[in-house]
Each structure stands twice: as structure tokens, then as C-alpha cells.
Amino acid sequence: MGKVSRAVFVALALVLLGAGGVWAADTCYEDNFGNVLVGKNFKLPKAGACNLFNGYFSGQYFPAVGNVCHTTDPDVAIRFNLFSSNPTGVTAKVVAYTCHLDPTTLQGFCYDCQTPGACVFVSSFKKIICPVPRPFGT
């Protein structure tokens, strides 16, 4: 392999590896309605700790922010307390999500409470491999 070919190969590898790294720190969850919650640079907390959550619902105009705490007993629960809003359209919404995730199976459930509106039980909430692409908005 010539010097030019080797340089092009190295440059291409760096570009491809760099592009893949952009998505590497995202963590995704999916509910039974097919909504994908994307946590930007998010990592689940260790037992007895809390982490901030900053992200959005993929393909929608719903940013999401809040905290995620893991009970002191590592086998009990991971709790999500997230808030979101949709400032677009005729009916603006403010939404509170309270989710329970089993730390062993990384599956659980949520309550989705909207104003105006009522709370909806979300029967399935699970960690998934993040889809590509996962755009904010449509």
C-alpha cells in the first residue's frame, strides 16, 4: 500500500470512527406505544445515586429533562422523573413521566400525566439499542 493510499485509509477510518462516536453515549428506551426516548450522553446511575437526564422523544418535538435515581438496594428499582413539553401546534402540552425500571431486566412501566388531560398507564418501558437515525423533531 502506497503512502497516499495509507493516508487516505487512515483519514477515512478516523472520520468513520468519529461519526460513530457521536451516537455512542446515547441511551434509548421504548414504550408500548412505540415512542423512543433518547437520553443524550446518559448513563444509568449506580445503586444509591442519581443522574440527570437530558434528551428527547425521537421523531417528535418533545424535549425531556429530569432525574433518574437508583434505590440503595441495587435489586429494587430505578426511577425516572421526567418532564417534557410540546410548544408547537394548537394544543400545547406539559407532560410528566414517572417510570419504574427493574435494574435486572431493564424493563418496567410508566405513568404519563399530561396537562391538560389525565394520567395514562404505560404498561411497557424498556431499554433498547438506539435506532439510527434518531432525529429530534420531524
Image: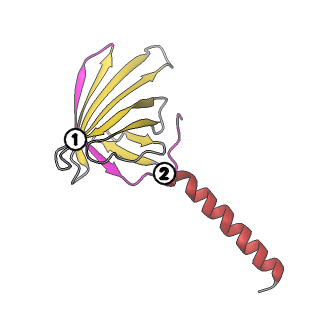
Amino acid residing under circle 1? Thr
Q: Callout 1 environment at 10 Å: few (<14), some (14 to 19), or many (20+)? A: some
User: Which part of the image, by quadrant, shows the C terminus?
Assistant: top right
Gap between marks 2 and 1 measured at Cα: 23 Å
Magenta segment includes 135:
yes
- Viewer-side residue, 102 vs 33: 102
> Residue 25, labelled with which disc?
2
In the image, what residue occupies the spot 22% across and 53% down? 105
Q: Quarter of the image holding residue 37? A: top left
- Viewer-side residue, 115 vs 59: 115
Q: Position of residue 120 (x, y in %)?
A: 23, 26
Q: Secondary structure at mark 1?
A: loop
88 vs 67, left or right, is: right
In the image, what residue occupies the spot 83% across and 78% down? 4
Q: Position of residue 41 (x, y in %)?
A: 48, 45
**For the residues bearing labels 2 and 1, Cβ distance under 8 angstroms:** no
72 vs 46, left or right, is: left
In the image, what residue occupies the spot 32% across and 49% down? 127
Amino acid residing under circle 2? Ala
Q: Secondary structure at mark 2?
A: loop
- Viewer-side residue, 77 vs 32: 77
| 26 over 110 or under it: above or below | below
Sequence order check, earlier mark of 2 and 1: 2
Q: Callout 2 environment at 10 Å: few (<14), some (14 to 19), or many (20+)? A: few
**Which residue corresponds to mark 1?**
71
Instruction: Tell me the magenta residue range.
Output: 116-138
Magenta segment includes 121:
yes
Q: Position of residue 130 (x, y in %)?
A: 43, 51
In the image, what residue occupies the spot 46% across and 22% down? 86
